[in-house]
Amino acid sequence: MKKNTLYFLIGILFLSLSSFAFHKFYMGVFQINYAAEKKMIQITSRIFVDDLNKGIEKKYHKKTFIGTDKETQADVDLLKKYLSENFTIKINGQLKSIAYLSKELEADDVLVCYSRITAVEKLKTLEISNTVLTDWNAEQQNITHISVFGTKRSVLFTESSRKEVLKY
């Protein structure tokens, strides 16, 4: 009887511990820096590449291989399109074009994308809209760190919180 109880408890312990090991979290990290001397906003995005491929496939109904050796230029073009539709910035109330610069794979599972906005003369308000992967997964959270005029702020974007306006 004691043996069966011990096995039962070990089984429960194993199942509870393994559920933590198999649970995946859905997080993107974005960094926005205003370089006043360059009149530029620099943007770095870190997104799990497997989730990004799934999100792009769901939205455009086309399988992509971003971050793999099967990646094509069409995949990169869809990535640029996806980011431009799901991550936008308004400066002083005007929507600005975000120029995609490059990307790299970090630690085999995180895609790091580099972008920028040029010709930013004055910055009074910054409106950020971030819906990256929230349409694909309601659990997705995008934390965005913003550094402007030496002030650092962080904003969490979720399915229900998609936009933030910051005043400087």
Image (cartoon, rainbow, N blue to C red):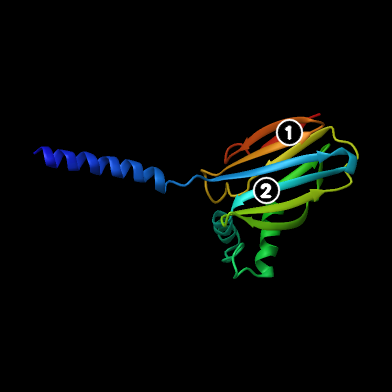
Secondary structure, mark 2, is strand
Q: Is residue 157 left or right of residue 32?
A: left
Label 1 crowd (10 A; few <14 / some 14-19 / many >=20): some
Residue 118 on image: x %, y %: 86, 48
21 or 138, which is in the foreground?
21
Residue 149 on image: x %, y %: 82, 31
Q: Is residue 99 above or below residue 140?
A: below
Quadrant position of residue 27: top right
Residue 61 on image: x %, y %: 57, 64
* Quadrant (top left, top right, bottom left, bottom right) of the N terminus: top left
Label 2 crowd (10 A; few <14 / some 14-19 / many >=20): many
Provide the residue designation for mark 1.
165
Of badges 2 and 1, nearer the viewer stands: 2
Residue depicted at x 47% and y 47%? 24
Residue depicted at x 73% and y 36%? 146
Secondary structure, mark 1, is strand
Residue depicted at x 89% and y 43%? 38
How many numbered marks have been drawn onto this rendered protein structure? 2
Per the model, the C-alpha gap separating discs 2 and 1 is 19 Å
50 or 81, which is in the foreground?
50
Provide the residue designation for mark 2.
45
Check disc 2 and give the amino acid type. Answer: Ser
